[in-house]
Amino acid sequence: AIRLATFWRVVGIQTKDEAHAVWKALGLKADGTVDFLSIALPMIAMSSQEFISRVTFLFSVCDFNSNGTIKRSELFIGLRSLFKGLVRFFPMCQAPTPDELEEATDVVFQSVDNDKSGELDLEEILTLGYRSKGLRTLLSPFPVTDRRVFESLVHFTGRDRARERVRE
């Protein structure tokens, strides 16, 4: 979750009224926060990056422990957050139900988890990305202007490093 003051600073909103309006539109929760993943994942999906670069970045964000793989639960949470956020940006859309997301998660694992490890690595996700018409269709409304291709995992380790400094 992310708080308004952090969001306001990061996004660079100029006025308090504007910040509150945006915050409310993004799904303000009772505790004064919004679900960060339901903002970040749709923004990645809608970015101007090349299709496969968006797939790589989405995978990297859903790899919650930065170990280079995602489990079923991480994929489910990522899909749920992506669709939850897309509905916020596009209210005329309908998010899949939890049962539909569970089924989609199972289908992805059955079709892509080639080594049957119970985890998907970036190579398996990239294979899905290159072969999946559904994924391409989902991301196709968002035009590509950045033609660079990134197929390397992005590691988000800042939080872990901060924790290590506190322990020292």
Image: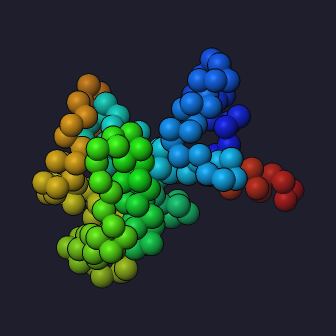
Counting from the top left corner in percent of width and height, residue 61 is at: 47, 52
Res 14 → quadrant: top right
Res 132 → quadrant: bottom left
Q: Residue at x 39, y 65 (%)?
A: 75
Q: Nearer the viewer, residue 95 or 11?
A: 95
Q: Nearer the viewer, residue 141 or 58?
A: 141
Q: How many numbered marks, from 0 up?
A: 0
Q: Residue at x 29, y 44 (%)?
A: 92
In the image: residue 131, left or right of residue 138: left
Q: Residue at x 66, y 28 (%)?
A: 9
Counting from the top left corner in percent of width and height, residue 140 is at: 19, 40
Residue 44 visible in image: no
Counting from the top left corner in percent of width and height, residue 54 is at: 33, 43
Q: Residue furthest right?
A: 168
Q: Residue at x 53, y 46 (%)?
A: 27
In the image: residue 157, left or right of residue 151: right
In the image: residue 120, left or right of residue 33: left
